[in-house]
């Protein structure tokens, strides 16, 4: 069975972002065994900021074919040796609700909450949140408003999302061995498009 992939982007990206998007799109097109879909703020009829939340809900509404799906930002570049099937096997074995590819060009410090020992192995690392290219277990959060809190005061939805997953008894985190390069590290992001006033 092919794996559903949802590529999250903006209808009118800034020029620098557009170059990243083209690179990442071309790379995804070479990955076999996927049902590839592009979703944008315009398609889902939401502002770029609110798109951070609604794009996570959309695959659950859409009810695609595969029991797991991938929700990826448009600036995450897969390495040439990326092995989708191998990554899926690790994700299934983990029991996590959501697990992201580890950014190869950023430092993700281990989560050290007080009174709790995160699930960490040689293959995965539980964290309070994750972003980028997310492997998701379909149905990991019920489609009730209380399970999908509104955007918080911060620029993104990653932390709010992680809290919601844990409140529902799930785990979220990162792969340890499967990585992707975050081309937009330290640069533009989906949420700040409104600040840039370029669409």
Image (cartoon, rainbow, N blue to C red):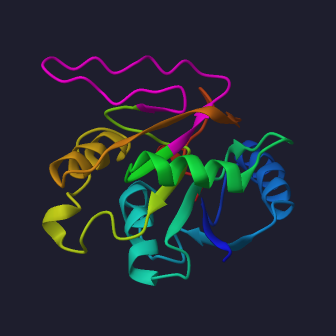
* Residue under the point 85% across and 57% down: 26
Find out whether residue 139 is within the magenta segment: no
- Tell whether position 120 is magenta: yes
**Left or right relative to 51: residue 72:** right
In the figure, residue 146 lies in which quadrant?
A: bottom left
Q: Is residue 28 visible?
A: yes
Q: Quadrant location of the C terminus?
A: bottom right
Query: Is residue 189 placed above or below 115 in the rendered structure?
Result: below
Q: Position of residue 21 (x, y in %)?
A: 74, 53
What residue is rendered at 38% in x and 44% in y? 156
Q: Give x and y (percent) for residue 68.
A: 51, 66
Residue at the outermost front position: 93
Quadrant position of residue 128: top left
Residue range of the region highlighted in magenta in the rendering: 100-125
Is 112 placed left or right of 98 in the picture?
left
State whether the magenta stretch is mostly helix, strand or loop.
loop
Q: Toward the viewer: 197 or 29?
A: 29
Q: Position of residue 101 (x, y in %)?
A: 59, 40
Q: Residue at x 49, y 72 (%)?
A: 67
Q: Does 35 appear above or below 77?
A: below
Quadrant in the picture for the N terminus: bottom right
Residue 37 visible, this angle: no
Q: Residue at x 36, y 32 (%)?
A: 127
Residue 32: x %, y % from top left? 81, 65
Q: In the rendered view, does 144 fall on the left or right side of 38?
A: left
């Amino acid at each position: 069975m092919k794996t559903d992939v949802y590529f999250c982007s903006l209808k009118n990206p800034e020029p620098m972002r557009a170059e990243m998007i083209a690179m990442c799109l071309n790379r995804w097109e070479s990955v076999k065994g996927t049902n590839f879909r592009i979703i944008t703020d315009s398609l889902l009829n939401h502002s770029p900021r609110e798109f951070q939340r609604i794009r996570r809900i959309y695959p659950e509404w859409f009810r695609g074919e595969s029991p797991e799906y991938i929700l990826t930002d448009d600036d995450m570049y897969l390495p040439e040796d990326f092995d989708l099937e191998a990554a899926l096997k690790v994700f299934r074995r983990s029991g996590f609700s959501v697990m992201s590819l580890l950014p190869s060009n950023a430092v993700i410090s281990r989560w050290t909450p007080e009174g709790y020992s995160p699930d960490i192995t040689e293959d995965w690392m539980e964290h309070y949140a994750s972003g980028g290219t997310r492997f998701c277990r379909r149905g990991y959060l019920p489609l009730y408003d209380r399970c999908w809190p509104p955007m918080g005061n911060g620029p993104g939805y990653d932390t709010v999302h992680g809290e919601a997953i844990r409140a529902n008894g799930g785990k979220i985190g990162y792969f340890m061995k499967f990585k992707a390069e975050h081309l937009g590290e330290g640069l533009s992001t989906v949420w700040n498009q409104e600040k840039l006033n370029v669409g």
